[in-house]
Image (cartoon, helix red, strand yellow):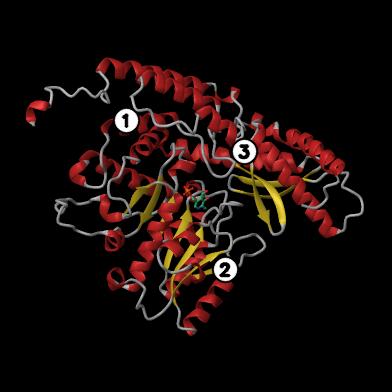
Amino acid sequence: MLTQIPENRTIPIDLTQDEFKKLGHQLIDRISELLYGIAEHPVTSGESPEKIQELLETGRNLPEEGMDPEALLNHACQLLFNHSLFNGHPKFWGYVTSSAAPLGILGDLLASGVNANVGAYALSPMATEMERQTITWIGEFLGYPAGGGLMVSGGNMANYVGFMASIRAKTGLDIRKEGLKNYPRTLVCYCSEQTHTWVHKAADLFGLGTEQIRWIPTLPDFSMDTKSLEMKISEDIKSDFLPFLVIGTAGTVSLGVVDPLEQISEICRKNQLWFHIDGAYGGLAAAVPEFEPGIELINRADSIAVDPHKWLYAPLEAGCVLVKDPAKLSDTFSYHPVYYNFDNAEVNYVDYGFQNSRGFRALKVWLTLQQMGKKGYRQLIREDILLARAAYELLSGTEEIEVFTWHLSITTFRYVPENLPGGLDESGKLEYLNLLNKELLDAIQAGGEFFVSHAMIGEIFVLRLCIVNFRTTIKDIKALPGFIVNKGKELNSALQFEGRIGP
Ligand SMILES: Cc1ncc(COP(=O)(O)O)c(C=O)c1O
């Protein structure tokens, strides 16, 4: 048997050192051409799925024989550079997806090069310490007294970790063994109607069921109505439910609103509930509290989710959960199977969350935190917020545009043509404007000049821009109102010509 194995392995997944260097240099050159010429690209190629599948030859079989790495990398660059949506484009303001810091991009390459498994200290001594330092620094930047935390893939995962920790902390250890099956009271949690949909998935996945989410109404400014919160909690206690968690949001996904964190924390204290903050988008704005006074009270939370891949401009993926007491994470997640030999370490990140093997996500954040310093990041976040405010002001001064909200770096507005179709009552007008603005959104998203998203304000369909983009300048913002009006006029004429008044 042994004689059949050659002295050296010949399957060429390993490149020679010279090949690796050549391909690496070529790739960096090509990526730099993309990044430093990104404004010349359309924001998106806007092609149909059929076209993308045709370019990729989706139906072809995996080749039996291996292929040339240089040709493969070139082909991948050609496909991706010419047929992608670029969230690093200066006019990309959709959803909450940031442009990626170039040093962070190199950080990801370096992390892959070392390929540390940051599940266990023994497997990643330096990487574990760098992650720990990154977590402490993120807390320090926000003014959150983090005893510990964990880097995860994004906001959803960071919120899940906080959610799980709250269940465990408020029910006791037996829940880990017995589950909710025999639990004497039904667990219920509270959040505002504006909370991101991660909470559906959490309640569903972790066995509560979505009916156990109490959706608290919001005030006219879209922040949580804490009077309703208090009332709902006491009603539930009377009905023998077990309230365990209130989720406040610092920067709601649609409008960027910050919930009244002080009142929520008081209610949690009085009722001994876990206070979790979803700060995936806006939590980092606690570093510039002048825009949303009260946001600095994120420091009251038992746990908070923040997303370096949003407002620290880390390349995807990088989320982070911070907790005051890291024992609450290990109490929730840690097991000690016989095949681990990790017990003599101070921290093994496998004990703090869902993952076993873990990549080195912290490195890109560790690098850019120091590249920018607190001062640099404060300035970048502040500028994004000021650009969103400038957009609000410019749009509000434009004929045929109606503005709605500006919070943090999110501004909402809609196009309202002078010449609406005749004979519409109020509800017909709403229906027509919703249809027109939805068509406008689709046209903008496919067109490649700008990229915005949408929000619902009550029944009203509005366009929404969210700036987490260090490449955006005031020149880009100034170009928006005229563009919206021109596109709006075009679509309004087409809709009226087609006679499509309702959906
Ligand atoms: C407030 C809020 N929470 C959670 C999320 C989910 O974050 P991720 O997409 O990183 O999982 C988002 C995403 O935009 C968000 O804005």
**On the rendered structure, is 397 left or right of 217?**
right
Q: How crowded is mark 3: few (under 14 residues within 10 Å), some or many (20 or more)?
A: many
What is the CA distance from the residue labelled 3 to the residue labelled 2?
31 Å
Report the amino acid beneath label 2: Ile
Q: Nearer the viewer, mark 3 or mark 2?
A: 2
Front residue (pair 295, 113): 113
The answer to which image quadrant residue 25 occupies is top left
Q: Earlier in the sequence, mark 3 or mark 2?
A: 2
Front residue (pair 436, 103): 436
**On the rendered structure, is 263 left or right of 121?**
right
Q: Name the residue under label 3.
A: 387
Q: Residues within 10 Å of mark 2 (few under 14, many from 20)?
A: many
Circle 1: element type: helix
The answer to which image quadrant residue 45 occupies is top right
**On the rendered structure, is 212 left or right of 417?**
left
Contact between marks 3 and 2 (CB within 8 A): the answer is: no
Q: Position of residue 378 (x, y in %)?
A: 48, 40
Q: Which of marks 2 and 1 is nearer the N terminus?
A: 1
The answer to which image quadrant residue 117 occupies is top left
Q: Note whether residue 471 is visible.
A: no
What is the CA distance from the residue labelled 1 to the residue labelled 3?
33 Å
Q: Position of residue 437 (x, y in %)?
A: 74, 46
Kindly identify the residue that appears in the image at 40 percent across and 46 percent down. 153
Q: Which of marks 1 and 3 is in front?
A: 1
Q: Position of residue 334 (x, y in %)?
A: 25, 59
Kindly identify the residue that appears in the image at 37 percent across and 62 percent down. 164
Report the amino acid beneath label 3: Leu
Instruction: Indicate if the residue with disc 2 has its beta carbon within 8 Å of ligand 1.
Output: no
Q: Mark 2 points at which residue?
A: 216
